[in-house]
């Protein structure tokens, strides 16, 4: 039977601000990426999200981003590979304290936002992230954009890597995501998003926004949990996968 992971970015609330439908989305995914305080999240939210994931029986990953709360980590920053490595290790360390306290394992690391997109094309940045993870724990999986420099860097660092695809994002001809500021970057038609996702998993193909056919590998599907229809969308994606004979499983069971 084919296996695929279903992941969502959670723990992105901060102080008095609530973002996402975490308690509902978590019931339908197999892995969660927990914000570590730089782009979103705070210590209390991190602790609560880890506890929620443990109770739901889903695997936990760190979701480190740029130190940019105001921009939600989606603004490109100029930083050296040395700085990026330290950012990732710092945020991993924060979440590892909460997973250790809860008696659960950290399954993976998935960089967030601009850090994720920049490292997808910049080998020096990708290598810094991969090396940072490997120095902390070689058993932790690097979750990165399918076909990106992050996957290449993770393998070079001796890590297990998982290729991620996005259910609700448009792709460019080179396999990278269409920047959010461009029209059509986010796919709002859930039926279209589900059709595209099924094809990525079953056929290893996606149609770029410019019409080209792009080969893609799908170990994990990201579904965003920060919009009102997120819960229904996650349930529909899961049902569509299972209807194709694909079992939803955490990343560690796949790579």
Image (cartoon, grey):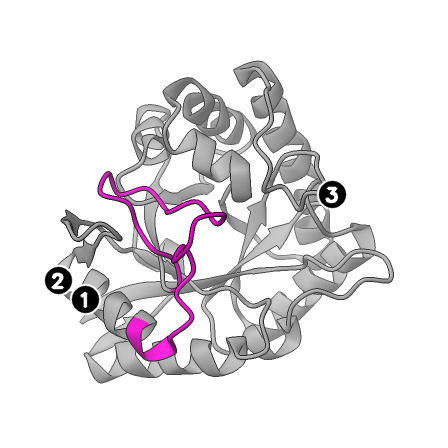
Q: Is residue 237 left or right of residue 201?
A: right
Identify which residue is drawn at 28% across, 45% down. 172
Q: What is the spatial separation of the Cα atoms under label 2 and label 1, in whole angstroms?
A: 5 Å
Number of the label disc, if any, that sits on residue 203 = 2
Number of the label disc, if any, that sits on residue 199 = 1
- Residue density around tag 2, few if under 14, some if 14–19, many if 20 or more, within 10 Å: few
Q: Earlier in the sequence, mark 1 or mark 3?
A: 3
Instruction: Give coordinates of residue 95: x percent, y percent.
Output: 67, 46
Disc 2 secondary structure class: helix
Q: Is residue 17 left or right of residue 82?
A: right
Q: Earlier in the sequence, mark 3 or mark 2?
A: 3
In this figure, which residue is indicated by the disc labeled 3?
Answer: 69
Magenta region: which residues? 168-192
Disc 3 secondary structure class: loop
Instruction: Give coordinates of residue 193: x percent, y percent.
Output: 33, 70
Q: Nearer the viewer, residue 49 or 192?
A: 192
């Amino acid at each position: 039977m084919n296996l695929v992971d279903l992941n969502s970015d959670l723990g992105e609330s901060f102080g008095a601000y609530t973002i996402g439908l975490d308690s509902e989305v978590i019931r339908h995914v197999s892995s969660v990426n927990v914000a570590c305080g730089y782009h979103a999240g705070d210590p209390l939210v991190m602790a609560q999200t880890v506890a929620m994931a443990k109770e739901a029986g889903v695997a936990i990953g760190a979701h480190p981003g740029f130190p940019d709360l105001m921009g939600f980590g989606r603004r490109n920053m100029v930083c050296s590979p040395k700085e990026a490595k330290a950012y990732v290790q710092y945020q991993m360390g924060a979440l590892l304290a909460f997973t250790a306290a809860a008696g659960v394992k950290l399954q993976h690391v998935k960089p967030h936002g601009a850090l994720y997109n920049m490292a997808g094309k910049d080998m020096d940045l990708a290598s810094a992230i991969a090396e940072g993870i490997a120095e902390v724990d070689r058993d932790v999986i690097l979750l990165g954009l399918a076909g990106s420099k992050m996957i290449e860097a993770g393998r070079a660092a001796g890590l297990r890597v998982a290729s991620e695809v996005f259910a609700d994002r448009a792709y460019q001809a080179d396999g990278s995501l269409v920047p959010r500021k461009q029209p059509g970057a986010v796919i709002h038609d859930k039926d279209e998003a589900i059709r595209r996702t099924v094809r990525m998993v079953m056929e290893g193909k996606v149609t770029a926004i410019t019409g080209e056919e792009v080969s893609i590998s799908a170990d994990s599907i990201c579904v965003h949990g920060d919009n009102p229809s997120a819960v229904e969308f996650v349930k529909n994606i899961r049902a569509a996968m299972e209807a194709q004979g694909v079992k939803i499983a955490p990343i560690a069971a796949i790579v």
